[in-house]
Amino acid sequence: MIQASNVTLRFGKTALFEDVNVKFVPGHCYGLIGANGAGKSTFLRILTGELEPTKGEVIISPGERLSFLKQDHFQYEDQVVLDVVMLGNPRLVEIMKEKEALYAKEDFTDEDGIRASELEAEFANMNGWEAESDAAILLNGLGVETDLHSKLMRELTGSDRVKVLLAQALFGNPDILLLDEPTNHLDLAAIAWLEEFLINFENTVIVVSHDRYFLNKVCTQIADIDYGKIQLYAGNYDFWYESSQLMIRQMKEANKKKEEKIKELQEFIQRFSANASKSRQATSRKRALEKIELDEIRPSSRKYPYIDFRPDRTIGNEVLEVSHLSKTVDGVKVLDDVSFILGHDDKVALVGSDELAKTTLFQILMGELEPDEGSYKWGVTTSQAYFPKDSTQEFQQDLTITEWLTGYSPVKDVTYVRGFLGRMLFAGEDGVKKINVLSGGERVRCMLSKMMISGANVLLFDEPTNHLDMESITALNNGMIKFPGVMIFSSRDHQIVQTTANRIMELVNGKLIDKITTYDEYLANDEMAMKRQVYTAQKEEGED
C-alpha cells in the first residue's frame, strides 16, 4: 500500500497539489490521468521520494519495495544489459556484491561464515538463484534478443534501451510499481507483452500514459488529477470518460431546471410583490427562491479542441492508383513493387514496425520524393492535405500563427482564420505568437488547423498523435471517425486505428500486405498465423 496524506506542493504562490489524500492498494492498476501540466509525472516523483512535498507525507507499508521506470536512457552506458535489469532490485544486487566480497577473502573467519549464511538465506528468500534467468525472461518478453543480454547498454539502439529500463522496473516482483509513459518507443509486440504482464501483476501499479487503449486494457481504477486534487474512480479510462461526461450533462440539466424555476419565481415576485392580495404568495415564493442553490459546475482544467475536417468537394470514384512502386533508402529497399488502388470509402491504416517505409510512401504520394521505379496517380476530383511526421521546416519562419495559417487559407480574412485557430485552442493573444517558438504540441495543433482550413477530401497522416495530450488525441480520433472523405494514416494509437480504419496495409521487408478488415481482426488473424507457424515448426522438429 502507498498513500499520500495531506500532500501539498507549491511553487511560489502557485499550488500544484493542495491537501491530496489518496490511497493505492494491492491488486489494482491505477491510471493516473490529467491535463498537460496537471502534475502527473511530478506526483509520481513525490511518491518515489525524489521530490519533497511542501506539506504532508507519503506513507508506504513497512517492508514493501517500490520500483519506478526511469527515463534516463544514458544512465548505464558502460554496464552490461543483464546487470542493469537486476539493478531494479537494489537490495538483491547489494547481497550479491557482499557475498562475492566475502567469498573472495583469503582469511575467511567464523564471523564471515555467519554473515555469509545470513546473506545466503536472504538471497534465497528473494529468489536470487533465479535472478539472471528472471531478468532474461523479462528482456526476451519485451523483444530484447538473448545475444544482446551480455552487451553494454551503449551498444544498444534507443528502443532496446527503453525496453531494458522497463525490464529493470518490472524486475523482482516489486510491491509498488510506478510507470511513467511505459509504452513510449515500444513496438506492438512489446506493448502486448507488457499489457499481459500488468494484467497478471498482483501488486500495486500506478501508470501514466497517453495510450487510451493501453489504459483501458490494464487499468482497474482511474486516478484523475484536476483542480489540484486527485479523485479515484472505479473502471478503466473509457468508463471514466463516459461517466464524467454523463455527470457533467446531468449537472447542467439539473441546473437548467433550477434556473427555469428561479426565473419563474422571480417573475412572480416581480409581478405581484406590490399586490396586497398576492403578497403572501409572493413572500412564500421569495423564500422558495432563496432556498434554490445552483450546483457549482467548475470548468475542467481539460480543454478539448474541436477537430472537424470538412471537404469542399465530394470525391469521385477514382481516388488513387499506385503501380509497382519501389524505393531504396540508404542501401535498404524500403518499398518493393508496391501496388494498390484506393476507393472513395477507404480509410487505410499503414501499420507495421518499419517506420521508414511508411514515411517514404507518404513522401512519394505527396511528391516530396521520387520513386526508383513505378508510378502513382491521384484522381482529378481529389485534393490532399498532409500531416508529416517531421514538420520542423514548416516552423522556421518568422511569422505569427495567424499570418502562417492565413498563407494556407483560401479566404484571406483574419476573422475567418482565427475561427480555425480558436477551435484548436489558440485563443486571443495566442494568435500573435511566433511559430518558431511553439512547443511540439502547439505545432501539431497548427498542422491540424492547416489541414482543416484546406478543405481537402483526402487526408494523409504520418503519426499525428506525437506530442499531443489525451484530450487532443480524443478530439483528433473523433474528427477522423467523422471525416467523410478518404484517409491514409499511420499511428501507434491502437484506439485510433481500430475505430477509424476499414482497411489495413502493412509493409514487411518492403512488400505490401493489404486486407479489408478492422485492426483488431487483423491482429487476431496475424496472431493465429504466428501460432500455426510455431505449431508447424514444432511438429516438423518432432518428426525429425
Image (tube, helix red, strand yellow):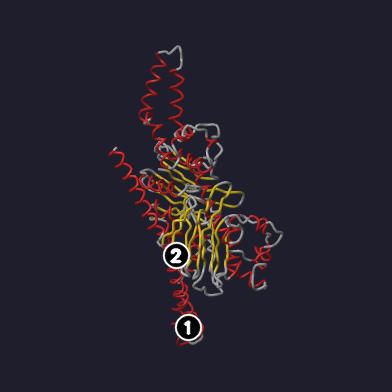
Residue pictured at 43% horizontal, 26% vertical: 95
The residue indicated by pointer 1 is 268
Residue 316 placed where, x, y %? Answer: 51, 74
Circles 2, 1 touching at the beta carbon (< 8 Å): no
Q: Which image quarter is the N terminus in?
A: top left
Indicate the quadrant where residue 113 lies. Answer: top left
In the picture, measured across the screen, residue 514 lies left or right of residue 355, that is: left
The residue indicated by pointer 2 is 245
Indicate the quadrant where residue 100 lies. Answer: top left
Q: Nearer the viewer, residue 442 or 330?
A: 330
Is there any visible trace of residue 291 in the rendered image? no
Q: Nearer the viewer, residue 143 or 362?
A: 362
Residue 143 placed where, x, y %? Answer: 44, 42
131, above or below 225, in the image: above
Which residue is most to the right?
Answer: 398
Q: Circle 1 — which element?
A: helix
Q: Amino acid at mark 2?
A: Gln
Residue 426 placed where, x, y %? Answer: 61, 64
Q: Spatial distance from mark 2 to mark 1, Cα to Cα?
A: 35 Å
Q: Amino acid at mark 1?
A: Phe
